[in-house]
Amino acid sequence: MFIVQSYLGRGRLKQGEKYLRLLKSGFWKNLYTQRAQIIYADTLYKSKKRRGEAMRIYKKVLFDTKDLETASHAAMRIASGYLDLLEPEKAEKYIDKVIKGNPGFIKTHSVESFAIAKRFAEQEHYKTALKIVANIAVKEKKQAEEILKEKAYWLESEGEKEAAIAAYNRYLKTFRNGRFTDFARKHLDGLMLTQDDENLSQKLQFAETLLKRYSDREIVKRALEEKVKILYKMGRYRDILSLEKQLKREGLEAWIGKSAKRLLQQSLENGACDDAVKLSETYQLQLEARYDEAMFRCDLKSGKYEEAKRLIDKHIGSEDLHEKLKWLYHAVHYYQKRDENKKVILTGNDVLKLAHNLGTKKYDDVLYDIVDAYYNLREYDDMMLRYVKDIEKRFPDDIRNIDLFMKVVRYARKRKDDLMAINYAKKVIELQKKANVKVYSPDIEILYAHMLRKVGKYREALQVVLDLLTYKLTDVQKAEVLYLAGELSLKLGKKDAAKEFYTKCGVIVKESAWQKLCAENLQILSD
């Protein structure tokens, strides 16, 4: 072995090969022959053209030898070769053979082992690098310092935050004025910044401390980004937007759009339309299509008609008929907001036709918008009544019918159709009772009583009036109701009851037209 080493060391390759062949022919399994093979392969490896041959020799020695030390030398060289080929996965297999089969080799060859560990780390195979240094026994302080610093950094790179923090702290405690003190302290602060801590307020405070402590751009950027991440996690999107200048300076402007977008989404979800419209305009945000409806409603509410129309136009031509239908429905409300009543009617009818074709009743309430449009136009009254009838069939007990029926009452009175007015006034009263509301009470009941009296339905009118006396009325309303009660009682031949009602009426409100009528009638009855 030593003769081969001597020849090869003096560059006499052919003589070395000749002597090696002699050794192999008679002593292949001899330990020294195998070590001579490794020395020979080391020489070949220096030539890029013969590296493949060298790797084959290392592997043959590894699998033929029974000597752990020789096998470890061969395995380390094979691992190094694969690292040169940028194949760390293959290299790792051979390092594992050494660690498992002969861990003492790593301890006694610390310089070689640390060098190969650093090469694994360079190729981002930090776990393997850490496995190697875990088996290194270092006596020399300078190497120990570098190993501890690298170990901490590799743990950090591997995502082992707690272990990395412990390693950096150990370094700073062991080497107070070491070569890598600034490196360790900066990385430790960075790790503490990103540590999984449920106390977000403390993390935020620490990030702000680092921003004040360091001028180094890298740590400032990390601290600022971590601060923004914490604020984002806390839902403090407005605070992030207040950092717009700093974020742009550090190349973190993506957080501006991200936070503005989330704030816009929240505003839309909460119906905060003023905020939503302002954010949309300021940051020129584009949300997912699922937010288009909410954005449309806010644009409409805020008078941003161009933006609302743009959203309608975006969807109304959709090949998806259900999508088209939905936005036709929204278009009705757009035209309604702009008092374009004829377009409300036309588009509303398009909604009804398409909904019928698609077999859905989801948008049938567009009928209410059509009726409103006809009512506002003061034209086509018969058409309006046709849609009212349709609504009564489709939405018999809908609370919206209270307003609808009141429109019909007003319309009927305008054209002096007493029976229609009576019919729909009664419907208003009945529906209010079902819904337990009194939106138009007591005025609608008083009107209903007057209309019944007008057509000679005195008994029904009196019952309505008597019910009204249980309502909370103003003095003037009570006087009017008592006058009606007296008059209707007379019509039904109940003179004593009439006197009683007129008498009560006289003490309710003085100097009232109804009080005067009550007094006059009471005088007539008393004569």
Image (cartoon, rainbow, N blue to C red):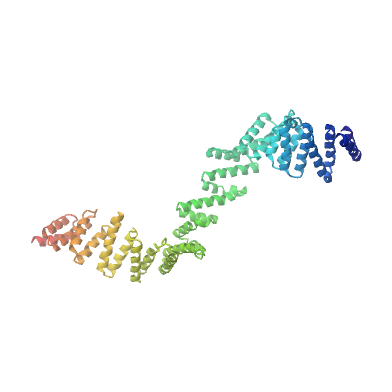
Residue 180 visible somewhere in the drawing: no
Nearest the eye: 136 or 181 = 136
Q: Is residue 412 left or right of residue 32?
A: left
Pinpoint residue 127: horizontal percent, then vertical percent. 67, 38
Residue 305 in picture, x, y percent from top left: 47, 62
Q: Quadrant of residue 143?
A: top right
Horizontally, residue 197 falls left or right of residue 472, namely right
Q: Is residue 24 left or right of residue 317?
A: right
Residue with the most extreme front position: 26
Residue situated in front as seen by the camera: 217 or 69: 69
Q: Find residue 241 and report its horizontal and vertical position in percent.
A: 54, 49
Q: Quadrant of residue 399?
A: bottom left
How many marks the image carries: the answer is 0
Residue furthest top as drawn: 139
In the picture, residue 512 is in which quadrant? bottom left
Q: Quadrant of the C terminus?
A: bottom left
Note whether 420 is above or below 132 in the view shown.
below
The residue drawn where x is 43% and y is 62% is 360
Question: How far across and down, in percent of the image, does residue 221 sit?
Answer: 62, 44
Image quadrant where one finds the N terminus: top right
Residue 492, can we see it? Answer: yes
Residue nearer the viewer, 392 or 453: 392
